[in-house]
Image (cartoon, grey):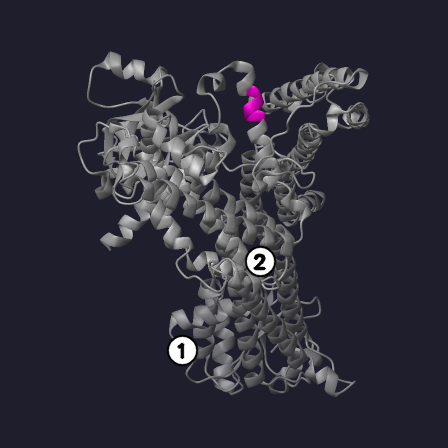
Amino acid sequence: AGGRGKDGAPIITFPEFAGFSEIPDDDFLNVVTYLTSIPSLEAASIGFIIIIDRRRDKWSAVKASLTRIAGAFPGNLQLVFVLRPSRFIQRAIADIGIKLYRDDFKMKVPIIMLNSVSDLHGYIDKSQLTRELGGTLEYGHSQWIHHRTAIENFAMTVKTTAQMLQTFGTDLAETELPNDVQCTEELLSSHTDHHNKLKDELKLAVKQGATLLTCIREPVTRSANSKLSPDELENVATVERLLAQLDETEKAFDQFWTKHHLKLEQCLQLRHFEHDFREVKLTLDNLMETQAGFADIGDSVTRVENLLKEQKHLEEKGQEPLEKAQSLALHGEQLIQNNHYAVDSIRPKCVELRRICDDFTNETKKKYDILGKSLELHKQLDKASQWCEAGIYLLASQAVDKCQSQEGAETALVEIEKFLVTAKEHQLSNPKEFYNQFDMILTPEIKANAQRIVQKLEDVQEMFDKRQVSLKKLAAKQTRPVQPVAPHPESSPKRASPKITRPAAVENLGQFCGDTGRGPAAQNGNHALMHKQEHTRNTIFFFHMCLVNSVTLLPFLSFSHIINELIETERVYVEELQSIIEGYASEMDNPNLVHLIPSTLQNKKEILFGNLPEIYDFHNRHVGTGGCPVIFLKEIENCIENPELLARCFLKRKEDLQIYEKYCQNKPRSEALWRQCGDSIFFQECQRKLDHKLSLDAYLLKPVQRITKYQLLLKEMLKCSKNSEGTAELEEALATMLDIIKSVNDSMHQIAITGYEGDVSELGKLLMQGSFNVWTDHKKGHNKVKDLARFKPMQRHLFLYTKMLLFCKKREENTDGHEKTASYSFKNSLKMSTVGITENVKGDNKKFEIWYNGREEVYIIQASSVELKNTWISEIRKVLTGQLEACR
């Protein structure tokens, strides 16, 4: 009931119950054990007071109760009070029985037999006794059971919650941290969800305990006069103890979770940092690789300016990755400052990021410095070259007839002296100082170009010195007048001109069709004198000036002037073609002149003239009013203000212009025939009738000169119409003409192939041709040959067709004391359907590999430049890709 003795001993009351003896021993023991466990240890240590109420019972019931209690009571006893039977006989028997059987009960505490409750009040205060025992203590058994059940349930909840927290904590401690962002995020989310659920469980448990505590304290809350019994106070203490235990468990768990959650968050930060580091480093590495690939320092002002633009573009492209890298490094340092657990992993990555950023910045600055030097160098070289060109033009523009007088000679001397003063502008007067200034960027190619220009300066200076000597002599005394010889109108100088740059394909055409840059006048005169050293130099100089005067004046002209130039020169060209056909080719069929034709020329008109009549018909196919070709007169006149119309003219006639290829292919045979019979009386008679100052061979060179001149005119038109309507079509037209010239040039090389047993026309289109160093590395063959081949390159001229790659050896032969003629001796061939390429060879960026039959045969090919190598690789790749698409 919750009462206490005077010394605080807990009181247990066994009320009258008829079925007491029928309660199983185990149940009785469990109940007694539970009742003795309820008081605090301090109260239990005082000892329990037992009150046995048997007033309406018999002595036998008293005896049975004492015996069961004595044998099963687990606690410490202090006193036993027995309210004996109230009936007289049973009381008398009880008095006798207690005396006789006291020792049999085996109780070490006094057993006090009481006759009435009033006797009991002498030992225990009424306030500690229930109403059944005459006391005032309020006791409700159902309420007591309800409170005890709730307390036990709460205790179980506290225990279960503590176990769950312990298990979760153990799982957290044993969890291995993931190595990627996604798994770390999933683990953090999973642990957080579990933590939140456990926190909810804790809140429910605390709420349960608080509710229970309120229920126990309800009497006091309801009435200020009410007091809790000692037993109820014990219940309050128990619940408070359980709540305190729960609070301690929660605090310990929160502390552990805070550390674990921090570690998970730091792990996630680390994984994000590592992921971003890998991405940024990959980008930076690619950036550094791209930058390392910019090894070219340029071979001209335009090229260097383009390289500077590319470097600027790369720098701009690298700004975002560099900013990301710097930001990531800063983020890493913040993680370190925040006491991140993975400092040893983060710090090296921050150092690496900053190092790469510094390397890129330093390398970019270095590239700018080198390209700046290179730009300065090439500008100086260009100035020097332009000075030479201007000097050559000045010398050529000084008319011979005007210099015969003293006044004319003095005027020419003044012009030369004024011009020589400008020599300071090119700053190449001291080559040694120049080389020292640019030593860091002087590649063999640039050095060779610089030496060429220095030599050119010396040659021009020598020419000026000689001219000055001659003019001073003329100025000092009168000399016999010299009859001047006027060049052809097309070759007469008009205006000063800067340096001319001729395409490589044009240069090659010159080599096949005569000396490079040679005009019609080159063929005139005595051939023996032509090969004398000094006269040859003067003649080449004259030819160069003809080219300068006729073509490089164009940059100073307007678009309309260039079109007029095109129209006028086209008229002259067609007239010259007509004069050749009518004055030479047709005369070979003239019966009156047949006897003058040498035997070596009999039936060889097609060899000498090639398809010249076809070219004439093409240019003069549609004749308009005035007898001039419509395409280059009427149509051009209509498009002076519309450059796109002019471009369409060339694009529309792209296929027709291929006839020049056939003419150029035949040109070597024509020249060989001319050398055999060019001095015949027949040609002299024809030249006399036509009143030509030049012999036939000079006019047979006209088509070659004309086809090369179109692209030069188109270039100048493009400069005049840049960024205007029709520019794109002009560019396309120029590209078309350059392709035609390249095709013509390639075909002229192709016809010089000897020793190939097949038909080259069956090999498909000729795409590329050029000379290379070639090494072989074949699986088959003698090891010595294989080893030697790796060190000693072969000089081979390669012809790339759509179906075949030919390897030839270039041979040069002297023909009748004239210039050397190139031929290509066939050595080997590879079918393009069975080859593969390796674009880069370690150790040399100008090399690439072509292999055959799964690298059974390997050809290591070295180009003269990286640009040439890339061009060839691009063409080969197109062929292989086309074959692959065809197979699909």
Residue ranking furthest to the top? 784
- Residue 177 position in % (x across, y down): 51, 48
- Above or below, 38 relative to 328: below
Residue type pointed to by label 2: Thr
Mark 2, other Cα within 10 Å: few <14 / some 14–19 / many ≥20: many
Residue type pointed to by label 1: Ser
Instruction: State left or right for residue 887 relative to residue 115.
Output: left
- Identify which residue is drawn at 59% across, 81% down: 115
Residue ranking furthest to the left? 757
Judge whether residue 539 is colored magenta.
yes
Q: Helix, strand or loop at disc 1?
A: helix
Instruction: State left or right for residue 474 relative to residue 813.
Output: right
Residue marked by disc 2: 727
Residue marked by disc 1: 21
- Above or below, 874 relative to 119: above
Residue ranking furthest to the front? 592
Instruction: Work out whether residue 89 or residue 235 is closer to the camera in this orientation and state it.
Output: 235
Judge whether residue 493 is colored magenta.
no
- Contact flag, marks 2 and 1 (Cβ < 8 Å): no
Q: Main secondary structure of the magenta part?
A: helix
Instruction: State left or right for residue 705 relative to residue 439.
Output: left
Count of marks placed on residues: 2
Q: CA distance from mark 2 to mark 1?
A: 123 Å
Magenta range is 537-541
Instruction: Work out whether residue 742 or residue 389 is closer to the camera in this orientation and state it.
Output: 389
- Above or below, 367 relative to 173: above
Instruction: State left or right for residue 28 relative to residue 52.
Output: left
